[in-house]
Amino acid sequence: MKVVKFGGSSLADAKHIKRVFDIVHSDNERRIIVVSAPGKRHENDTKVTDLLISCGLHAINNEDPSPYIEQVVARYKEIADDLILPPTIIETIQNDLLVRLAGDKNNPEQYLDCIKASGEDNHAKLVACYFQEQGVKAKYMNPREAGLIVSNEHGNAQVLPKSYEKLRRLRESCELIIFPGFFGYGQNGGIFTFSRSGSDVTGSILAYAVKADVYENFTDVDAVFSVNPTFVEQPKEIKELTYREMRELSYAGFTVLHEEALIPAIQAGIPVQIKNTNNPRARGTTILRTRENQNGPVVGIASATGFCSIYVSKYLLNREIGFGRKLYAILEEFGISYEHTPSGIDDVTVIIKENQLQEDEEEVLLKRLESELVADEVHIQHSLALIMVVGEGMRHNIGTMARAANALAKADVNIEMINQGSSEVSMMFAVKEVDEKKAVQALYEEFFAEVALPIG
Ligand SMILES: Nc1ncnc2c1ncn2[C@@H]1O[C@H](COP(=O)(O)OP(=O)(O)O)[C@@H](O)[C@H]1O
Ligand SMILES: N[C@@H](CC(=O)OP(=O)(O)O)C(=O)O
């Protein structure tokens, strides 16, 4: 049995939905289909999820949301008309959205999640309707009915393990299941969405629950590329990746798969396949537990912006028992989680996501760190990009770090920080955000030389 997720780009219009139908129809192992909300039809288009967010925010701020409501309904209507679906489907979708908008706004986050989730929920109804019209025994499945229970974290929910037992029953369905991605239900019955692009997470959860043979993730590229395709023209395609490699790469900017979408698949050892809806014959990329290592030390280079580093130095820090605990306790009080912590004998740097620290909190935090840790120096550096150079082969290859550092030096990029992951499948370089693209291109040229065609 296969669980198959189609992203927003694969469901953006009627033409794509017909392709999705053909893909599903061509393999009767494809039994559970996870759908996203309609995505972008062209570069300057707006995803339905973004329209819904604008709609919800206007309603919360007592501004008129109707232009956004009209745009959302128009997107579904155009698709339904092109697929020649019965008009009742649009009535259902419009009524559903209006009921959600008329809901209680006392908890704005809850209200917004309910509206955001309608994007996938209503698209799943529409896609199910199209499959039924084609004579397929297909059924829209509501995540509450299916038993997808998640943590009470709006916009950042996580599956609760108790979901799996009930979800496993989906395996027995004799109808094709069309399941909306991106959200589940809290124990209080409310709707909670995953973080953005979270339909990938839904697919992974279902694949784990039903013990699928494979989790197929259909998107709009032929494969996972070894570098972000907006930085390098025609980058090398990756045929196989390990879970650890993909996890590191998606964490650091390979948006093709959500960074949390691998966890259940890892636990059950289910292979994940990235495939192209527009070119389903392309081999795609397979992500699995182990792979034959034929790619040299590095398999991919990812980068992400929006980080800052907090530097704390104190003479003889290495001898102070409890220093780390005190430092992390202060961060915890500010609700901050950390990404990396490179350290030396007298200093430690904590890298965090910049959006975790409000501007007005910064000074207070630095003062507290300085006084409570009795530190010699505390400072913060903003606007950093993290670059991850990833590959299982790095463990067996000498000199990879030297090659990377040399390539960055040649490109005149100053390395602000280096961290070699304990797993030895990745090394991280922090550079100034303005140097991100130059640094990635230099590293790509070093490790994937003959095909490097930098953009810009
Ligand atoms: N290394 C990479 N390999 C492939 N695609 C990448 C990579 N990094 C970023 N992307 C982007 O990820 C996009 C696919 O992800 P996404 O937009 O979330 O698709 P979907 O609509 O299928 O959910 C691609 O169009 C591509 O621009
Ligand atoms: N529609 C949601 C969830 C999602 O997974 O979308 P996509 O498959 O288009 O990345 C979002 O935009 O975040």
Image (cartoon, rainbow, N blue to C red):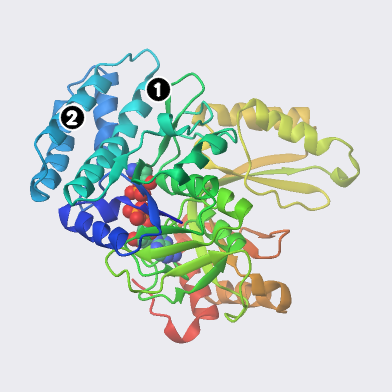
Q: Residues within 10 Å of mark 1 (few under 14, many from 20)?
A: many
Quarter of the C terminus within the rendering: bottom left
Classify residue 102 as left or right of residue 301. Answer: left
Question: Residue 310 appears at what percent x and percent y?
Answer: 64, 42
Place of residue 224 in the rendered image (x, y in percent of width and height, measured from the top left): 44, 67
Residue 341 vs 358, above or below: the answer is below
Q: Give the camera-side residue of 211 and 327.
A: 211
- In the rendered image, residue 253, in percent from the top left (x then y), is placed at 47, 56
- Secondary structure at numbered mark 2: helix
How many angstroms separate mark 1 from mark 2 (CA)?
Answer: 22 Å
Q: Amino acid at mark 2?
A: Thr
Question: Residue 92 has which mark?
Answer: 2
Q: Residue at x 41, y 69 (%)?
A: 223
**Amino acid residing under circle 1:** Gln
Q: Residue 327 falls in which quadrant of the image?
A: top right
**Which of the pair 106/99 is nearer the observer?**
99
Between circles 1 and 2, the one closer to the viewer is: 2
Tell me residue 337's x, y (percent).
62, 37
Q: Which residue is mark 1?
A: 110
Can residue 193 be seen here?
yes
339 or 221: nearer the viewer: 221
Residue 382 appearing in the image: no
Marks 2 and 1: in contact by CB < 8 Å? no
Rendered position, 254 above or below 320: below
At label 2, counting other C-alpha atoms closer than 10 Å, the crowd grade (few under 14, some 14-19, many 20 or more) is: few
Residue 45's label in the rendered image is: none
Q: Is residue 172 above or below residue 142?
A: below
Considering the numbered disc 1 on the image, is that residue within a helix, a strand or a loop?
A: helix
